[in-house]
């Protein structure tokens, strides 16, 4: 009789141990919210297909499914995940599709295994600083009109779109761009690419006056984002 009583308890204990082992082996993945680093001018955010968009404040937390819009003359510096910082210029719009981090166990500090961010860029201009920091696995993807841009290594780049044509300028590092059914194209530092375009390969920024301006401007913004990131360190985990 005692054996029959203890047998279910042993099974439960075994299953619990298996679950804990799996948890520590695979890590814990959770959704995170984007943080506002700084802002200027009117910026709003809200859920798709809702008309009651709310003003963005320094305390706002922007989650999966939120649309963010900057008005004329406004800008927003946003930390999507610790590895991906972005500045939205005026008259721009993005939709946050997914923000995730994975850690070893349920630690609040350290133990980072993976970070991933995916957004939809609808219009305007964004400048992105992507840094893996401690070299843990990190991925960043942008779905823009006519093209999908992905990054898995340190880089600084700018994306512009009027809703139809999209332009990508790589300032530092490298990212990949996929257009329609074509194979992904690597865009390296000092090059830009536009879609739609008759050119299948990236073009040197040195050959285009607008691209040269984008490179110089993005370098300044990249430094600003690094300073903002440094100021936020130690204020609590994502």
Image (cartoon, grey):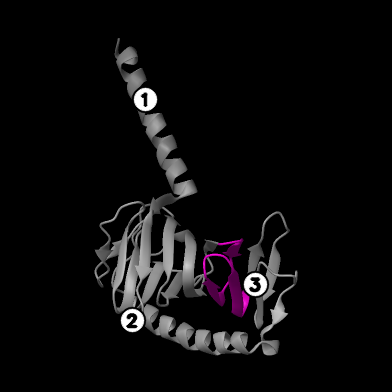
Question: What residue is shown with label 1?
Answer: 10
- Of 191 and 208, which appears nearest the observer? 208
Range shown magenta: 145-174
- Give the mark nearer the N terminus: 1 vs 2: 1
Q: Which disc number belongs to residue 194?
A: 3
Q: In the orientation shown, which residue stands out farthest toward the top?
A: 1
Q: Position of residue 9 (x, y in %)?
A: 33, 23
- Of 33 and 195, which appears nearest the observer? 195
Residue 67 seen: yes
Residue 101 seen: no
Task: Mark 1: give few (<14), some (14-19) or many (20+) Cα within 10 Å.
Answer: few
Q: Is residue 12 left or right of residue 173?
A: left
Q: Is residue 58 left or right of residue 7?
A: left
In the figure, residue 206 lies in which quadrant? bottom right
Question: What residue is shown with label 2?
Answer: 231
Q: Is residue 15 left or right of residue 154?
A: left
Magenta-colored stretch includes residue 172: yes
Gap between marks 1 and 2 measured at Cα? 51 Å
Q: Secondary structure at mark 3?
A: strand
Instruction: Classify 136 as above or below 26.
Output: below
Q: Residue at x 34, y 79 (%)?
A: 74
């Amino acid at each position: 009789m005692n054996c029959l009583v203890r047998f279910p308890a042993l099974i439960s204990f075994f299953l619990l141990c298996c679950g804990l082992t799996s948890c520590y082996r695979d890590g814990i993945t959770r959704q995170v919210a984007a943080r506002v680093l700084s802002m200027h001018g009117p910026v709003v955010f809200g859920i798709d297909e809702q008309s009651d968009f709310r003003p963005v404040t320094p305390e706002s937390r922007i989650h999966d499914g939120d649309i963010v819009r900057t008005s004329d003359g406004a800008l927003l510096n946003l930390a999507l995940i610790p590895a991906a910082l972005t500045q939205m210029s005026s008259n721009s719009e993005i939709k946050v599709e997914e923000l995730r981090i994975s850690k070893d166990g349920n630690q609040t500090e350290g133990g980072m295994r993976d970070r991933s961010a995916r957004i939809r860029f609808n219009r305007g201009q964004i400048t992105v600083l992507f840094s893996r920091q401690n070299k843990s696995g990190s991925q960043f993807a942008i779905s823009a009109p006519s093209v999908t841009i992905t990054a898995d290594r340190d880089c600084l780049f700018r994306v512009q779109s009027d809703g139809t044509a999209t332009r990508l300028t790589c300032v530092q590092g490298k990212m990949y761009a996929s257009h329609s059914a074509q194979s992904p194209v690597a865009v390296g530092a000092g090059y830009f690419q536009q879609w739609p375009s008759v050119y299948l390969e990236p073009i040197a920024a040195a050959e285009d006056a607008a691209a040269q301006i984008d490179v110089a401007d993005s370098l300044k913004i990249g430094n600003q984002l690094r300073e903002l990131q440094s100021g936020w360190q130690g204020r609590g985990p994502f």
